[in-house]
Image (cartoon, rainbow, N blue to C red):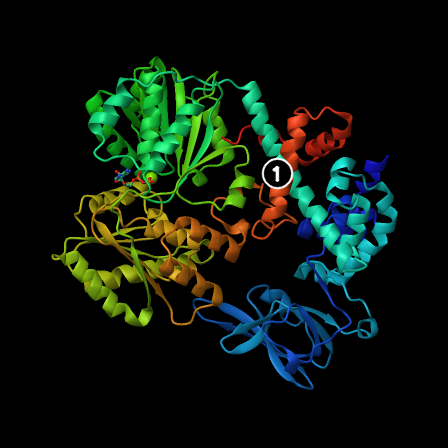
């Protein structure tokens, strides 16, 4: 059988054997012939051309240089550790640099041996170097080859030690390919391939490994990208179809007293037109008899809460319950406070359920919830526990969506016979291409307008040398009655160091802002939750003027009197995180400020991030830049999805392919929703191969 040949375990390939097979499995997750065939080169090098050190410029693509390696040295200070070496040829010398993998590097390169070094030139300071170059001993075939497109495969230090560098992997693929090609099955329907003029799968797989020229490589890449995006879109759209077809949803037929009472009597401002539009979208979703599954995107401060509240009132007016789930206890508590201020005068029965709710109180609340006496429940993850049973849950609102995993949300969803409508709110603006991929089966609403009268936050960049000036500014603002956040990065790998930075910073601030005139709070993830809440509460109540914290305060906290956000080591934060942090100020009537503190020397990317922050207050613009700078894998909240482990496509550059894929997926499903036509057999087979897990086929929300 064809499939079984490609599923042959990798150790049976000539040149592999049990030990190498073990390494391939561990290091690259290559278990079978199929896996090796689908381990694609990540770039191609023109092997016919060698550069001289003297000719290297920073704007060159990946290049190869012949030379000798010397002076391998480890450099380290508190912040960075790196290893450098010198590469020399007869025209000069340049630096090679590594930021990890030192253990393997030591002693790997010998003096007096000529090497071929591949890499992409970078500029660092004023010098050009090659970071994490690939290095191979120079051999005769390398010198005389005319291959213009030599595939380069990712390898690891451990594999290299077993002779499986890029070249070694290349050799294995050369062995496998001719035998395997006949077994490669087509995975796109012929009609689609001919419409789009895409090459067949056999040809594509051969060409991606050993392209005969630029054009055939381009065609192979295009097909693989298309195919990848096509199947993602197809599965997302089909999921949505299934949901609409199979599921029924509660119908909120009337707009009643609570909604109207709130709108006319309790709301102290008029809604922005964006808020109105979103409410209309939700209203019409909840009239269809199908379950709503809607993502609400809106920048920090755009007023999502009131939209959530009014959506919940639609449910209440029709005899249903509602819940609102927040990612942290503090945030759940703040929501509870603000929502109960809005709704208790209307007689709405509300409860707050978190991990620290006392068990007697919890029992009473759960009873009331089950009997339907509690109309709205707010809380944290505690809401998805099994004991939480609703009488009749009409709508579930989930705030700051990216903090919850798909599976967690699915559990909330399963709480009743007829699923509740789901409104997922996020303040992390997601670029369109990402939204289409991540949330392909959700409907998306956008609040693209801030309430009137907001003063844009002024953002400035200061270096550590200007700290005294910054302290002076903080003092000014505090004298005006304002409060100040000072935030430190906390990044897992250097946690201990970071914590030290935070406590050092705290101490210097306490020295600078002494009692009794000033009071300073500190909050970080290593504190006990109760202590954290206590400190947080003191700041919220205005008992302390300065809050020194890690990014634990990033999400949703609302202290309108805080008008200054100082971000320490701002170069170490990602863009969306900086924007989220900045969103903690600018919530009141006063002019607010965000001060980005960095060291003097910045990398190019860090400088770009800082510049964008200074120039723009627009979350969507920032998200687009973030996507361009970092690629989608790093965008907050996407790691968990798995959907974005794209092998070929790049959402920053392949928007047109994504759109094409979505269009064709939609057309095919429009014509054949069950994929039962014989020409679509290929598709349904491929889909179940790609997404065998139930969860993916289940609901996203
Ligand atoms: P976010 O979208 O970040 O959750 P919030 O819902 O917390 O924003 O709203 C931020 C602030 O703006 C709140 O104090 C809220 O009362 C206020 N707000 C919301 N909508 C309006 C509006 N249409 N006009 C004036 N203020 C508004
Ligand atoms: Mg909010």
SS at circle 1: helix
Q: In front: 562, or 306?
A: 306
* Relative to 505, 2 lies left or right: right
Q: Estimate the x, y position of residue 564 in percent, counting from the top left.
A: 25, 55
- Answer with the quadrant where ligand 1 appears in the image: top left
Q: Is residue 166 left or right of residue 665?
A: right
Residue shown at 29% from the left, 45% from the top = 532
Seen at 26% across and 46% down, the residue is: 587
> For the point 27% across and 20% down, which residue is it?
258
Whether 457 is drawn above or below 358: the answer is below
80 w.r.t. 243: above or below: below
- Using the rendered view, name the quadrant where residue 234 is placed: top right
Read off the residue under disc 1: 662
Q: Which quadrant is home to the N terminus?
A: top right
Is residue 169 something one can see in this rendering? no
- Image point (79%, 40%), residue name: 7
Could you tell me residue 263's position as x and y percent?
25, 27
Residue placed furthest toward the top: 371
> Can the viewer see residue 622?
yes
Q: Is residue 540 left or right of residue 189?
A: left
**96 or 627, which is in the foreground?**
627
- Provide residue 457's location: percent of width, then percent of height: 29, 54
Front residue of this view, candidates 266 and 131: 266
Image position of 682 with respect to 243: above or below: below
């Amino acid at each position: 059988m064809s499939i079984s040949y490609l599923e042959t375990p990798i150790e049976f390939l000539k040149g592999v054997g049990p030990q190498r097979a073990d390494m391939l499995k561990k290091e690259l997750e290559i278990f079978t012939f199929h896996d090796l065939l689908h381990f694609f080169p990540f770039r191609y090098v023109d092997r016919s051309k060698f550069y001289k050190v003297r000719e290297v410029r920073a704007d060159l693509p990946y290049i190869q240089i012949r030379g000798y390696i010397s002076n391998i040295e480890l450099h380290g200070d508190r912040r960075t550790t790196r290893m450098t070496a010198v590469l020399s040829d007869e025209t000069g010398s340049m630096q090679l640099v590594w930021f990890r993998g030192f253990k393997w590097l030591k002693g790997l390169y010998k003096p007096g041996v000529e090497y071929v070094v591949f890499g992409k030139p970078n500029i660092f300071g004023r010098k050009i170097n090659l970071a994490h170059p690939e290095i191979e001993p120079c051999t005769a075939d390398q010198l005389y080859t005319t291959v213009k497109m030599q595939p380069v495969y990712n390898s690891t230090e451990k594999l290299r030690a077993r002779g499986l560098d890029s070249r070694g992997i290349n050799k294995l693929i050369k062995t496998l390919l001719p035998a395997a090609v006949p077994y490669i099955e087509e995975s796109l329907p012929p009609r689609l391939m001919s419409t789009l003029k895409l090459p067949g799968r056999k040809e594509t797989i051969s060409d991606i490994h050993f392209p005969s020229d630029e054009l055939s490589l381009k065609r192979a890449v295009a097909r693989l990208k298309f195919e990848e995006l096509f199947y993602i879109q197809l599965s997302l759209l089909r999921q949505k179809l299934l949901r609409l077809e199979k599921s029924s949803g509660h119908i909120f037929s009337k707009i009643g007293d609570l909604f109207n009472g709130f709108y006319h009597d309790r709301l102290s401002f008029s809604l922005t037109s964006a808020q109105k539009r979103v409410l209309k979208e939700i209203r019409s979703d909840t009239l269809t008899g199908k379950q709503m599954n809607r993502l609400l995107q809106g920048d920090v401060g755009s007023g999502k809460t009131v939209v959530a509240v009014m959506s919940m009132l639609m449910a209440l007016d029709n005899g249903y319950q509602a819940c609102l789930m927040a990612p942290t206890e503090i945030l759940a508590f703040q929501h509870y406070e603000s929502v109960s201020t809005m709704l208790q005068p209307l007689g709405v029965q509300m409860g707050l359920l978190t991990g620290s709710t006392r068990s007697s109180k919890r029992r009473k609340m759960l009873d009331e919830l089950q009997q339907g006496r509690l109309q709205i429940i707010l809380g944290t993850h505690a809401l998805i526990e099994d004991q939480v049973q609703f009488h009749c849950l009409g709508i579930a609102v989930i705030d700051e969506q990216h903090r919850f995993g798909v599976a967690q949300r699915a559990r909330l969803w399963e709480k009743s016979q007829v699923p509740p409508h789901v409104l997922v709110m996020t303040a992390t603006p997601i670029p369109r291409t990402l939204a289409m991929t991540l949330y392909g089966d959700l409907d998306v609403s956008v609040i693209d307008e801030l309430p009137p009268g907001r003063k844009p936050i002024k953002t400035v960049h200061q270096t550590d040398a200007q700290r005294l000036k910054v302290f002076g500014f903080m003092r000014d603002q505090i004298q005006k009655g304002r409060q100040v956040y000072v935030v430190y990065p906390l990044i897992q790998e250097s946690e201990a160091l970071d914590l030290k930075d935070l406590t050092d910073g705290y101490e210097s601030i306490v020295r600078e802002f002494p009692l009794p005139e000033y009071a300073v709070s500190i909050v970080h993830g290593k504190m006990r939750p109760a202590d954290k809440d206590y400190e947080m509460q003191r700041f919220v109540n205005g008992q302390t003027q300065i809050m020194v914290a890690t990014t634990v305060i990033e999400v949703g906290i609302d202290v309108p009197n805080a008008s200054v956000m100082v971000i320490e080591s701002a170069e170490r934060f990602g863009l969306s995180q900086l924007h989220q942090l900045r969103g903690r100020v600018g919530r009141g009537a006063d002019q607010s400020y965000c001060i980005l503190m960095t060291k003097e020397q910045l990398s190019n990317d860090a400088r770009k991030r800082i510049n964008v922050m200074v120039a723009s207050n627009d979350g969507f613009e920032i998200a687009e830049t973030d996507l361009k700078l970092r690629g989608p894998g790093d965008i907050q909240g996407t790691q968990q999805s798995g959907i974005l482990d794209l092998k070929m496509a790049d959402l920053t550059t392949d928007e047109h392919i994504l759109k094409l894929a979505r269009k064709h997926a939609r057309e095919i499903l429009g014509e054949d929703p069950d994929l039962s036509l014989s020409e679509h057999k290929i598709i349904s087979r491929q889909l179940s191969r790609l997404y065998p897990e139930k969860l993916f086929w289940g609901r996203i929300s």
